[in-house]
Amino acid sequence: MFLSLFTLPSGRRGALAFWALLLAMATGPVAAESKPLSLNEALAHTLERHPELAQFPYRRRAAEARELQAGLIPNPELAVEVENIGGSGRFSGTDSAETSLVLSQLIELGGKRDRREEVARYRSDLVDSEYRQVRWQVLAETVRRFLGVAEAQENIQLAELSLELARESRETIRQRVQVGTTNDASLQRSAIAVTRAELAVTSARQKLASARVELAAQWGETQPNFERVRVELYELVALPEFNRVRRHLENSPQLSQYITERRLREAELQLARARGRQDLRVGVGVKQVRETDDHAFTLSLSMPLGVSDRNQGEIRAQRAEYEQLALEEKATRVHLMARLQRLYQELAVFRSTALRLRNEALPSARAALESIRRGYEEGLYTYLELVDARQERLAVERDALQAAVNFHQTLVTLEQLTGTGLTGQWKLTPDSIDGATEPYEPQTRFLKKQAGES
């Protein structure tokens, strides 16, 4: 009944067209191939939606709330004092009670309020510094995972090339077996090589799928909406002089954070010293005199006696932490300089290795394989020599790819370390990421602005 709705075309071609039509109706329109993901798009997605970066706006607002709280003065106190009650004689009961109403205010001395505000402000600045450091780490990790996807794509091509060469060798050996110039064992070994090459292709595709998932996780997605990434792995930029790289070390996010921390420790030390000053409490009130039924004003001044507790312990603790921070900064600087030198040397080696393998070794390996393949067809070389030539060519391809990937990965680490784009190869600063919107603006003062407007 279903078939009667259609006019069946006659002939073999007509039948094939009919079944193709049914298949198209069942599967729907063919989806267009997705556009390759660029590095700029990956960085923009990361900057806007990375889970770790998304928490900083809330941390900043909490810090600004504490900064606002630090500037508030203590609230005045209202006290009621009742005298001459519950005594003996004429003071028994409440007939002789005298009542005083006192309003007092604590006056902070030693600049405590200013010191508190300064500490809170530097703590807010420390959140900004932490954000910049985490942003560099997150964006650098995105580039590393992006390169991981690109490397997986290249490994698939190498695995497919290995499979193609294995199949060509098997076909050549089959022809030689047919003419009786080689034995069946060589054909069986070539079939094993084809099987292993097919498994290698499957494994490479699985690694690409995993690398895509890891990259998409940088912006909070579990299902990648891209199939491939677009990058030229063999574009190896020239390195600047080491002295120039070393000068940029002062821009390191890790060292820049010490500047803010040092200011914070200084402010905390000044606050500890200010807290060693005793505060003054001033009170004014009105008192009812029971005997004459008159009223009189009262004035009170009070200040604690700094006999033993002048906050000396806290001052010493803050001074020790300040001196400890200076030693930590010095040790970090030495460590970063040593790491910088090592990374720079590795970069030079990786770049030289990749260029020489691509420009010198790879053309020779390709020519040698082609020469041995033709010679094997003519009976001049053995099967083992053919296999060695094929493996040597593939090894050179893989080594060149690995050296190029290592160069880019190391360059990303170097630029993250110095906090600047030394070569322009990787764009890790927000200003260079087209279409990106930062979820966090370090210079805004949300709550203070709201408080000022209200």
Image (cartoon, rainbow, N blue to C red):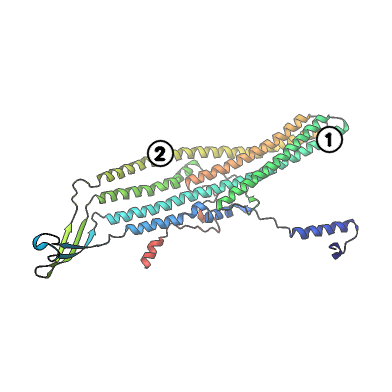
Is mark 2 in CB contact (under 8 Å) with mark 1? no
The residue closer to the viewer here, 109 or 322, is 109
Distance CA(mark 2)–CA(mark 1): 67 Å
Disc assigned to residue 331: 2
Mark 1 surroundings within 10 Å by alpha-carbon count, few (fewer than 14), some (14 through 19), many (20 or more) = some
Can residue 61 be seen here? yes
Picture disc at residue 146: none
Which residue occupies 57% across, 41% down? Answer: 407
- Relative to 92, is 56 on the left or the right? right
Instruction: Give residue 377's position: percent from left, percent from top.
Output: 82, 33
- Say which of 312 and 91 sits in front: 91
The residue drawn where x is 73% and y is 33% is: 389
- Element under label 2? helix
Residue 117, given in percent of the width and then of the height, sits at: 32, 56
Q: Which residue is mark 1?
A: 174
Q: Earlier in the sequence, mark 2 or mark 1?
A: 1
